Image (cartoon, rainbow, N blue to C red):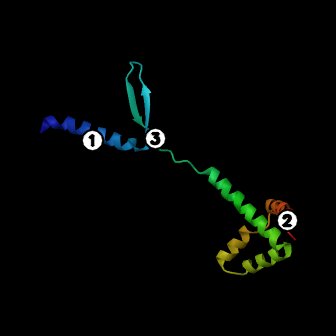
Amino acid sequence: MQANVPFDKRLKRIVRRHDKMSNGVVRTVKSDGLIVARPRLYKPKFPLKGLIIVLALGFLFKGLLLAYIGDAGYTERLTALQSGTVVEQVGAWVMQPDPVTTIVAGGIATILPQ
């Protein structure tokens, strides 16, 4: 049984390395010409592009509502939300008209029929 101990350790190391290669491999050529495959490290990236798209769509939606309902109606609905539950109050805070929303609403108002 003693003769198999180094073999078992080597086999465990090979299996562990093989499992790590599920993310892909990076192959490098050593100075002696040997091609060595190493596991690619998994580095999760923050989806910045998706976040920017969601924010842009949010501002577009707020601008569309502000242009469609009008200033008075939009303010009236925000006041109703502010006196509601905690979730409605958070929604009212998010939906407050900001400079970007008013610029988008001005652009959309020229397109919408009166």
Residues tagged 2 and 1 counted as in contact (Cβ below 8 A): no
Q: Choose mark 2 or mark 1, whichever is in front.
A: 2
Residue 28 vertical placement versus 57 (above, below)? above
Residue 9 vertical placement versus 45 (above, below)? above
Q: Which residue is mark 2?
A: 109
Three-letter code, disc 2: Ala
Residue 88 found in image quarter: bottom right
Residue displayed at 16% across by 37% down: 4
Instruction: Count neighbours of disc 2 (C-alpha within 10 A) and say few if under 14, some if 14 to 19, many if 20 or more.
Output: some
State the CA–CA distance, disc 3 to disc 2: 50 Å
Three-letter code, disc 3: Leu
State the CA–CA distance, disc 2 to disc 1: 67 Å
Q: Which residue is mark 3?
A: 41
Marking on residue 24: none
- State the image coordinates of residue 73 (x, y, percent, origin top left): 82, 77
Residue displayed at 71% across by 67% down: 94
- State the image coordinates of residue 65 (x, y, percent, origin top left): 77, 69
